[in-house]
Image: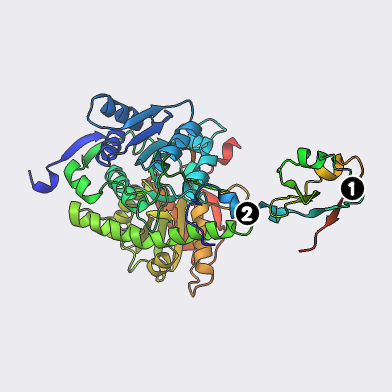
Amino acid sequence: MSEKTANMKVVEGSYAVAHAVMCCRPDVISAYPITPQTHIVENLSQMVANGELDSEFLTVDSEFSALSVLVGASACGGRSYSSTTSQGLALMYEVLYNVSGMRLPVVMNVANRAMGAPLNIWNDQQDAIGARDVGWIQIYAENVQEAVDATLQAYKIAEDAQIRTPIMVCMDGFILTHVYEPVELLDKEMAREFLPDYQPPAILDPAHPMTFGAFADPSTYTEFRYQQFEAQLKSMEKIELVAREFEETFGRYYGGLLESYFVEDAEIVIITLGSVVGTIKDAIDAMRSEGKKVGLVKVRSYRPFPVQALRKALKNASVIAVVEKDVAIGSEAGLLTDLKAAFYNSNIRTPIIGFAAGLGGRDITVKDISKIVAKAEAARKGIESEFEFLDLRKEIL
Amino acid sequence: MVIKAGSLVDPCSTRVTKTGAWRTFVPVFDHEKCIKCSLCEIYCPEGCIHQEEGLFVPDLDYCKGCSVCANECPRMAITMVLEEK
């Protein structure tokens, strides 16, 4: 067994992520169970009960309370962790703004799941994309290993004195949370070296009273939002830097803000986020063997949105197809709209078409990717449809 | 004033944050009509009306122009006037 695979184990995605959280040594964990996040916090609860993890695990009555507990914990200087999904994330909505506004470096795994109604527990990314503007950094994982590694990286980014911004590490529900695949679990000591103890710039302390998230009237509110805005833009550099530092220590790297796959000479470029990347890479491998010049850009950091990196990565494409598991009802969809906005004031005039796919857990297959590529090819001669629901079952409408 | 990220402030922040800034109407006192009943001082929800040399006056750093004082004054000695800023 080589040194590189010494710690490789076949485990459930949720366990792997819980193990990563353990290696991050959070002082306080608070969560409310909800499918498909449950196994992550169940495992953490078990680790605390077993004495493997020295954390306060607070069971609460709702996701609203879970994140509110972490506002207090983080303000007191504790490294804080939660995990949720879908309706749970929605119930946290008010607190999401409090955490980011108070600049508390909370890290949370979001096990992406569809929003109800209609009731659906399967995977899409409507929950997190819908919370794209709450001031949290959002990192999307392609596979379990990336979710593990991004969790450790997240604390290092979030707790940086210049950033101080909470992070959602997004992983597709069931597809990544419930899959068993080979994962290199983090080494506790290496993780400790990579991520030192949290050094808060200020804490809640009765001996030195202080107010967090104080009143800001119209004469200062804009400036607080500007500070958050600047910190997120600055985090782009940090996300890249931490990904490289992680590579030096752990030997794994999958892009900081983006990952490009066969993009350099690609005529048709697909852009997406999350676990569907794996399927698309397989589809591209097959199409490349047939001589089709197709490439892929994986958006790892959706917030901050890496405008410059995207312009650079996509400048040679002759057509771009956006595939995403969300829909902005009344408009188009998150990534599509953001990408078009990123290009509007640049020289890039590449046609862009978008697809809402995999909603509510519908599989996105290699065949679907071929269909998207065929539609993209046609769009080079003129866009017929800028945005559509992939494989819409018209017969049941 | 320099703001700290996360809106972190030391205690007693309202000493420097003048919450009267959002006022639209300002109370103007007619001291001739005033009978010194002190109802304005008692009813003021901000506690910012006080006596200066025997006359009732509002602290305009904190008065939000709510009109409670003008409404409660039995002698109509307080008029709310649109404040031009």
Q: Residue furthest bottom?
A: A347
Where residue A265 sits, quadrant-wise, is bottom left
On the same chain: label 2 and label 1? no
Q: Nearer the viewer, residue A189 or A370?
A: A189
Mark 1 packing: few (<14 Cα in 10 Å), some, or many (20+)? some
The picture places residue A151, in percent across and down from the top left corner, at 32, 45
Mark 2 packing: few (<14 Cα in 10 Å), some, or many (20+)? few
The residue shown at (57%, 49%) is: A328
Q: Which residue is mark 1?
A: B77
Q: Nearer the viewer, residue B29 or A225?
A: B29
Q: Which residue is mark 2?
A: A217
Q: Is residue A353 visible?
A: no
The residue shown at (78%, 38%) is: B43
Report the Cα–Cα distance between label 2 and label 1.
Answer: 31 Å
**Which mark, residue A179?**
none
The picture places residue A368, in percent across and down from the top left corner, at 42, 48
Q: Residue furthest front?
A: B53
Q: Residue furthest left?
A: A1
Mark 2 against mark 1, which lies toward the viewer? 1
Q: Nearer the viewer, residue B40 or B31?
A: B31
Q: Identify the secondary structure beneath mark 1.
A: loop
Image quadrant in which the C terminus of chain A is located:
top right
The picture places residue A142, in percent across and down from the top left corner, at 33, 48
Image quadrant in which the N terminus of chain A is located:
top left
Q: Nearer the viewer, residue B33 or A210?
A: B33
